[in-house]
Image (tube, rainbow, N blue to C red):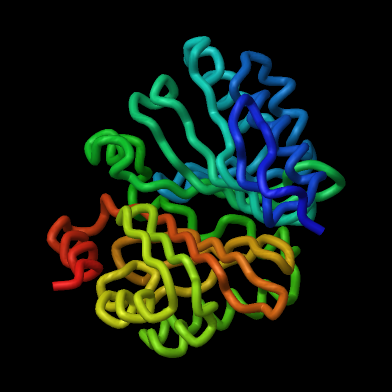
Amino acid sequence: MSTSRTARIMGRDVDVSKATPDVVQFLASYFEAKSGDDVDALMAHFLPESITYVDATVGWAFRDWQTLHDKFAELLEAWPAEAVAYPTRIIGDFDSAVVFFTDSPEMFGHELRAAGTVDFRDGRIVRWVDTWDGRSLTVEATESMRVPEDVYPGEFAENEVGENASPVLRQAAGAFAAALAAGDALAASSLLHQDVVFEDTSLHTLLEGRIQTHAFLDHNLSRLAYGPESALRHVVGSAEGGAYEWSSGGRVPAGVTALELDEDGAITRVTVKWDTSLTPKATLHEAKGSTIRH
């Protein structure tokens, strides 16, 4: 059962229409701690005996509680008092969820809008994977943070954690991801509600309706990291929605696609987030230009 459409978190209205109250309360507490100066309060949200935290954009991977504690301690000490991280949309339940959130410019020099896929166990986080667009910072700044290609993690502990998402969501995500990987825009579009909203937040593209979305996918799948050669990695969320992480055989190693479902299992909203800094500007302009009707 969902909470009301929005929740007031850290002075902001957050879309929680597809989230359960317990996961909303937990993530509100998490971001309040991340915006503070008490690393122990923040780390209390993670399961000490089993934790993996990955930044999929730059390839940072923290696979034990103490290493993650030390990294957060370093960051919290460096961030000024006005630095804040806050959620904007939460989808899922207290088994697994996706949270869209914003890191204020004081944290990394530019505003960073990311998606975090989260798995829980015993009321704590056991796996968290962040995805954001490398062009949120300067491309040079992102490149300076990125691990070498041969060091980039091949897995994000998805096999260790297992699949905790609802079977309904897993079926929808699996079918949608498979259609995109096959380059089949028609099959992908058949899974969408007639009035679907499709957002590629990295391309700054917003489409309304199945017909417009099909046209965009049909024209662009060969250019997009979540098209051919992509593969589903892991699913999080409930029967009302969540997200699937994907890997790519191209230049972009990983990304995330959030899905919201209606009571019949049709996809009513798609939100994609990936690192466009690894894609040539000309390709991005071609994809964005295809949404303009001439």
Q: Is residue 163 shown to the viewer in this render? A: no
How many badges with numbers are in the image?
0
Residue 277 locus on image (x, y percent) = 26, 50
* Residue plotted at (35% across, 36% down): 145
What quarter of the picture does the C terminus occupy? bottom left
Q: Is residue 191 left or right of residue 95?
A: left
Relative to 203, residue 197 above or below: below
**On the image, which quarter does residue 241 sit in?**
bottom right
Residue 206 locus on image (x, y percent) = 37, 60
In this view of the protein, which residue sits in the foreground, 8 or 172? 8
Residue 165 locus on image (x, y percent) = 72, 65
What quarter of the picture does the N terminus occupy? bottom right
In this view of the protein, which residue sits in the foreground, 108 or 103? 103
Residue 194 locus on image (x, y percent) = 50, 79
- Residue lying furthest right: 122
In this view of the protein, which residue sits in the foreground, 28 or 107? 28
Q: Is residue 180 left or right of residue 220?
A: right
